[in-house]
Image (cartoon, grey):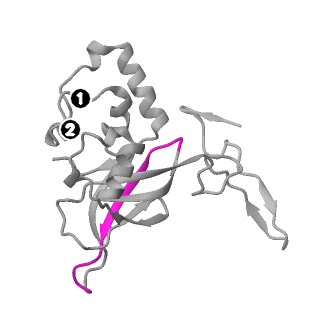
Amino acid sequence: MSAGPFGAGPRDRPRPRAERSPDGRRAIRRASAHEGHQIGVTPMSETTTLHFDLSHLERGQPFTLHAGFDKHALIPHDVQSRARARLGQPGLGPIPEHRLTHYADAVRLPSECPILLRVTAPRRRASDPLDRLVLTSIRIPRRHRAAGLARRRLAPLRSAGPVSAKLTAYGITPPPPDDKLIDIGDSTRRWMRPSP
């Protein structure tokens, strides 16, 4: 093998091993990011309920949550569902009633990596090529948000700053304690609304 000025060239690198398929053809085996798992299948996941603020949109229309390849119909909140949500998730306490409009129950999300979440509404006209995109958010797994809060506690002067614009827009000042902030401060886990 000859090394070029920048190290080994593309022809000098080991090639994927060719394997024979059951019908006798050669097939090149390509490993996914997690060896032994199918592409698109998350080996570790968690199931949660996500809450949304879609008060800026017309009521009575169906909304769909897209989380990876999964789709979930959003359910409109009523008085009882809001009360149940607040009991199970104290972080939702400071959110005004009229701002908790929809939820998706039993959403399976990866526990090891961020995921893009999208909410869509039906097309306005049949000639529209796609459903309307009404909300996007990046959901960071709770474990990683907890680690971020722990790092913030270790260096409070570096991380101290103003209350987030999102919490201020909802009248949540001063910021809630960390055990509640972990679920509402990050707009991607339980309570989502486009940033003001």
In the rendered view, tell whether residue 154 sits above or below residue 171: above
Q: Is residue 168 left or right of residue 36?
A: left
Spot occupied by residue 179 in the image (x, y as percentages of width and height)? 38, 29
Residue drawn at (36%, 65%), measured in percent from left and top? 75
Residue placed most toward the observer, 128 or 104? 104
Which stretch is magenta? 111-126
The three-letter amino acid code for the residue at tag 2 is Leu
SS label for mark 1: loop
Q: Position of residue 22 (x, y in %)?
A: 85, 70
Quarter of the N terminus within the rendering: top right
Q: Cβ–Cβ below 8 Å for labels 1 and 2?
A: yes
Answer whether residue 22 is magenta in the image. no
Look at mark 2 in the image and give the residue it sits on.
167
Q: Which residue is mark 1?
A: 175
Residue appearing at x 24%, y 44% in the figure: 95
Residue 40, located in which quarter of the rendered image? Answer: bottom right
Q: Earlier in the sequence, mark 1 or mark 2?
A: 2
Across and down, in percent, residue 93 comes to 29, 40
